C-alpha cells in the first residue's frame, strides 16, 4: 500500500468518523497524476501573465481608497467572472486613505543639491513651505535609539542603515522597524522630521515608499525615504561637516474611504463548505504600476485556480480566491477576518502570494504536514517544477491572512525567489517589464499543485499540528 | 637592434634633421620600463576615484552655464593646482544655457496614469498649463519619417524605437537622430509635441535627457524622453485604442552664459611646445551628479597625468589636461579649437575620456600608428593591463576634440567597456555608486601608458598617416 493510499484511506476513515460524506473521491494515482499534469500545463499557460499585463496596463497604480482602486475592483470582478469563477462579489470595508502630494528635498548647505525622496505612507505633511533644518545622521537604527531625549531638538533625523539582500526577504523584516518605528523614535528625541535610506537593495534614484506606524504618545513628524544613492551622498557630506536640508511633503488623508476584498470561488464538488483560501492583494502603492507587488500575486492565484476550474472533475473542497483591497495600508486582512469570523473553522488552509513574480523554490506547510503523506506527495510532485518542501513549518503566510491565522486557520507559505524583489519593491520601478513570464508560470504551477492537493484531498492540517509543549 | 630602439633612433634622426634639440632622451628600455611600471602603479592609485568622489559629492550636478558649473570650475582649478599641475587656468567662452523647469506627463485617457518624462536639452517650453493631445505612436523612427506632412496635425508624436546595447556604444550613434532630429521631423509633419523612448538600455523609471537640434526651417515643438517602461506602457495602450496625453515642460534659456575650459599642464622637459592633449568634460547633465558622464573621464585624465608628473624624469613633450566646459550642449569643443587656432600644428595628438568609468579594452591610434613601432610598443605594455591595440584607426576621439581633429590634429580613442554605460547615461541615476574603483583605475593605467609614451617618445602621428588614395 502506497503512502498516498494510506493517507487517503486514513483521511476517508477520519472523515467518515467525523460524519462527513465523501462523494466521488479521486483514487490516489489519479489525484497525483492530475496534480502533476496540472503543474506541467501551468508552465505553458500565459493566463497569469496576461492577467497582470492587463491590470498594470489598463488600470496601472491602484492605491487603496482611490478611484483607481475602484476601477481595479470592477476590472477584477469582470476578469474572475469571465474566467468562470463562481460567487464573484466584492466585500466592502472602509479605511483611512492616504494620498501622496508634492514631495521634494534639497540640500541647502554646504552647497545646493537635489535629493530624491518619497513620503512614507501615513506621513503627516510638512508646512506648505517645507521644513528646513540641520540633519543628525545615524548609520544604524541602533545609533538613533541610543540618542538621548532632546538630543535631536530641531533636527531632521536621518538613518542610513543598509538593508541586506536575501533570497527569502529576511533583510526586509530585519530593517522594517527603521521605517515603521523610526519616525516616532526620532520624534521622541526631538526631531522635526525623519529620513531613512530606502528599504531597498538597489542603487537607483528611485526611493521606496511603504507605511509607517506612529506611536500614539509621540509627536507625528513628516517622514520620507531617500533613494539609496542619496543616502550615500548624505553619509559622505555629513562626514565633512554640517548639512542642512529642506523637505516638502504635502500628503492628505481621506477618512472612511471605501475599499473591497474581491472574491471568486470554484465550488467544491463533494464538500463545498470546506474552503481552501488563496489570495493576493489587488491594491498597490501609487509610484509604480504594482506589477510585482502585488499584480503578480493576484495573477498567480488567479492563474492557479483558473486551471483547476478547467479540470474535468472539480476537487471536493471549495477553492476561494480573495483579492485583498488594502494590504499596503494594513486594513484588508483584519476586515476580511472580522467579516468571516463565523467561518474560520471551515477554512482548511490559507495562503497569500505576495512576494513578487519569480519562481517558487520551496513550500512551507502548516506544522506537522511536512512529514505527513500530504507533504511527501506534494514534494514529489513539485520536484520536477524546480521546487521542494521546506521541512520547517510556515510561521506566517502573508499580511492579509495574519488575522485568519490568529483565529486558528492553518497557513502555508510558498516561498518565491526574492533576491531582487527589493530592488523595485514600493518604487516607481515596479512595472510589468520586471516580470519574467516563465518564472511567473512556474509559480502558478507550484500554487496550482498545492491548491489542488489541498482541495482534492482530505488533509486536515489542524489535526497534524504537534501538541504545543 | 630592437624595434623600439630603431624607432627611437629614427625619431632622433628626424628630430635632429628638423633642427630640434632633444635633451636627455630616455633610452628605450628605460622608456618601456617606465611606462610599464606607470601602468602597474596606476592600478593601485586611488587618486582618480578620490577626484570623482569629491567632484560628485561636493559639487554634484554642474550643468554648463549654471552656478554649479562655476563652482566646479573653481574646484577643478584648486584640485589641479594642489596636484602639482602647472599653468592652471580657465579659458572663458559663452553659451546659450538651457535650464530645466517643471516637467510632467499624464495619460488622461483611456484612464488617468502618470508617465515619467524628462525634457530634452534645448527643448522649448509648453504653455504654462501644458499641452494636451492625442498621440500618434511610431515603433520605429523610419515609420515617423514615412508619415506624410500634415498627418500629425495637432498630435503628440511618440517614437518608441529601442536602442541597442553594444559594448562600443554603437547603438547610441545609431539611435541618436531619434532624439536630435526627431522633434523637427515630427514638427514638419504637424505634431505639436514630441516624445521618444529614452535612448537608454535600462528598464528603469528614470528617463534619459540629452540635447536636441532643431532645424531652422521647422516649428520648434516641446520634446521630452519617456522612461523605458513608460514607452512600453504607451505601446500597449496605443495598441488598444486612442491615447491622450498632457505634457508640461517649463525650461528656460539664458543667453551668453559664461563657461570655462579648465587647463592644467605638465610642462615637457625637452620640447615643451609640443603638446599631448588629454581631456574630459567637467560639465554634466543636471539630473544625476555626472559621475560616469563625465566625472569619470576628467578623473581618468587627471589621474593619468598626475602619475606622470610624479615620475623622477618628466617626458620631453608637454601634457596638457583640458577639462571642457560645455560638452553636453556642444559648445566647448568649438570654443577650444577657435581659441587655439594658431596652435593646432603643435598638438601632437588629442584624446578625450568620455565614455564612462569602466576598463579600457582597446586603443585605436591615429591612422598608420598601429603597425608602427609606437603601436607595437603600446600594445605590449597594455597587454598585462587587459587591453590591446585595435588595428583600426580612430575615426574620432570625442565631441570636444572634433574641431581639433577637423583642424588636422591626430586623435586617439581609448575604448572603454560601455555595455552598461547607457543604463544610466544622462539620467538621475548617474551617481558615484555606479563607478567601480578597480575598473576606473585600469582605465587610468591605460591612459597613463598611452599619454606617457606619446609625450616621452618622438612619435609624429601626422607623418605616419598613409597617403589618401
Image (spheres, coloured by chain):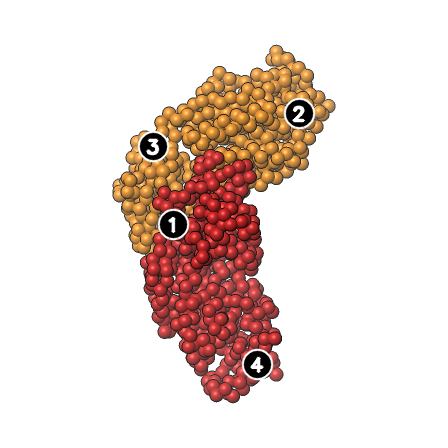
Chain colours: A orange, B red
Q: Residue at x 26, y 43 (%)?
A: A154
- The residues tagged by marks 2 and 1 sit, at their Cα atoms, a distance apart of 59 Å
Report crowding for label 3: few under 14, some 14 to 19, many 20 or more residues within 10 A (C-alpha): some
Secondary structure beneath disc 2?
A: loop
Label 3 or label 1, whichever lies nearer to me, is 1
Q: Residue at x 43, y 71 (%)?
A: B337
Q: Which residue, as the protein is rendered here, is positioned at the far front?
A: B150
Q: Which mark is residue B349?
A: none
- The reply to whether callout 3 and callout 1 are in contact (CB within 8 Å) is no
Instruction: State left or right for residue B103 relative to residue A387.
Output: left
Residue located beneath label 2 in the image: A311
In percent of width and height, residue B469 lies at: 61, 75
- The reply to whether callout 2 and callout 4 are in contact (CB within 8 Å) is no
Residue located beneath label 4 in the image: B7
Q: Residue A48 occupies which quadrant of the picture?
A: top right
- The reply to whether callout 1 and callout 4 are in contact (CB within 8 Å) is no
- The reply to whether callout 3 and callout 4 are in contact (CB within 8 Å) is no
- The residues tagged by marks 3 and 4 sit, at their Cα atoms, a distance apart of 79 Å
Disc nearer the start of the sequence (3/2): 3
In percent of width and height, residue B10 lies at: 56, 84
Q: Which mark is residue A215?
A: 3
Label 3 or label 2, whichever lies nearer to me, is 2
Report crowding for label 4: few under 14, some 14 to 19, many 20 or more residues within 10 A (C-alpha): some
In percent of width and height, residue A90 lies at: 49, 22
- Is residue A151 shown above or below B469? above
Residue located beneath label 1 in the image: B125
Both marks 3 and 1 on one chain? no
Amino acid at each position: 500500500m502506497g503512502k498516498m493510499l494510506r493517507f487517503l484511506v486514513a483521511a476517508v476513515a477520519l472523515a467518515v468518523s467525523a460524519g462527513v460524506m465523501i462523494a466521488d473521491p479521486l483514487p490516489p494515482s489519479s489525484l497525483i497524476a492530475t496534480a502533476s499534469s496540472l503543474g506541467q500545463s501551468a508552465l505553458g499557460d500565459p493566463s497569469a501573465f496576461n492577467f497582470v499585463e492587463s491590470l498594470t496596463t489598463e488600470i496601472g497604480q491602484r492605491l487603496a481608497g482611490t478611484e483607481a482602486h475602484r476601477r481595479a475592483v470592477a476590472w477584477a470582478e469582470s476578469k474572475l467572472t469571465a474566467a468562470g469563477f463562481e460567487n464573484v462579489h466584492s466585500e466592502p470595508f472602509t479605511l483611512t486613505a492616504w494620498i501622496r502630494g508634492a514631495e521634494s528635498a534639497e540640500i541647502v548647505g554646504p552647497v545646493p543639491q537635489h535629493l530624491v525622496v518619497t513620503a512614507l505612507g501615513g506621513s503627516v505633511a510638512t508646512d506648505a513651505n517645507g521644513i528646513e533644518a540641520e540633519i543628525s545622521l545615524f548609520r544604524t537604527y541602533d545609533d538613533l535609539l541610543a540618542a538621548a531625549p532632546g538630543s535631536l531638538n530641531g533636527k531632521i533625523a536621518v538613518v542610513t542603515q543598509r538593508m541586506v539582500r536575501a533570497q527569502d526577504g529576511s533583510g526586509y523584516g530585519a530593517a522594517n522597524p527603521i521605517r515603521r518605528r523610526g519616525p516616532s523614535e526620532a520624534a521622541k528625541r526631538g526631531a522635526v522630521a525623519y529620513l531613512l535610506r530606502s528599504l531597498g537593495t538597489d542603487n537607483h534614484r528611485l526611493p521606496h515608499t511603504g507605511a509607517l506606524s506612529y506611536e500614539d504618545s509621540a509627536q507625528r513628524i513628516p517622514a520620507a525615504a531617500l533613494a539609496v544613492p542619496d543616502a550615500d551622498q548624505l553619509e559622505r557630506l555629513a562626514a565633512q561637516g554640517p548639512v542642512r536640508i529642506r523637505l516638502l511633503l504635502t500628503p492628505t488623508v481621506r477618512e472612511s474611504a471605501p475599499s473591497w476584498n474581491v472574491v471568486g470561488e470554484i465550488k467544491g464538488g463533494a464538500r463545498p463548505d470546506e474552503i481552501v483560501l488563496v489570495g493576493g492583494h489587488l491594491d498597490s502603492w501609487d509610484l509604480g504600476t504594482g506589477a510585482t507587488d502585488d499584480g503578480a500575486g493576484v495573477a498567480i492565484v488567479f492563474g492557479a485556480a483558473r486551471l483547476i476550474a478547467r479540470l474535468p472533475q472539480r476537487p471536493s473542497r471549495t477553492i476561494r480566491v480573495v483579492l485583498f483591497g488594502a494590504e499596503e495600508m494594513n486594513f484588508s486582512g483584519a476586515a476580511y477576518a472580522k467579516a468571516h469570523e463565523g467561518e474560520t473553522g471551515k477554512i482548511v488552509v490559507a495562503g497569500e502570494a505576495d512576494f513578487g513574480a519569480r519562481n517558487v523554490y520551496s513550500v512551507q506547510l502548516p506544522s506537522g504536514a511536512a512529514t505527513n503523506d500530504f507533504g511527501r506527495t506534494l514534494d514529489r510532485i513539485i520536484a520536477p517544477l524546480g521546487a521542494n518542501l521546506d521541512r520547517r513549518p510556515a510561521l506566517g503566510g502573508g499580511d492579509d491572512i495574519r488575522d485568519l491565522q490568529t483565529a486558528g486557520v492553518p497557513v502555508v507559505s510558498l516561498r518565491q525567489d526574492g533576491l531582487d524583489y527589493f530592488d523595485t519593491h514600493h518604487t516607481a520601478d515596479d512595472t510589468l517589464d520586471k516580470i519574467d513570464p516563465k518564472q511567473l508560470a512556474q509559480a502558478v504551477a507550484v500554487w496550482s499543485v498545492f491548491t489542488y492537493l489541498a482541495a482534492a484531498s482530505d488533509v486536515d492540517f489542524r489535526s497534524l499540528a504537534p501538541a504545543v509543549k
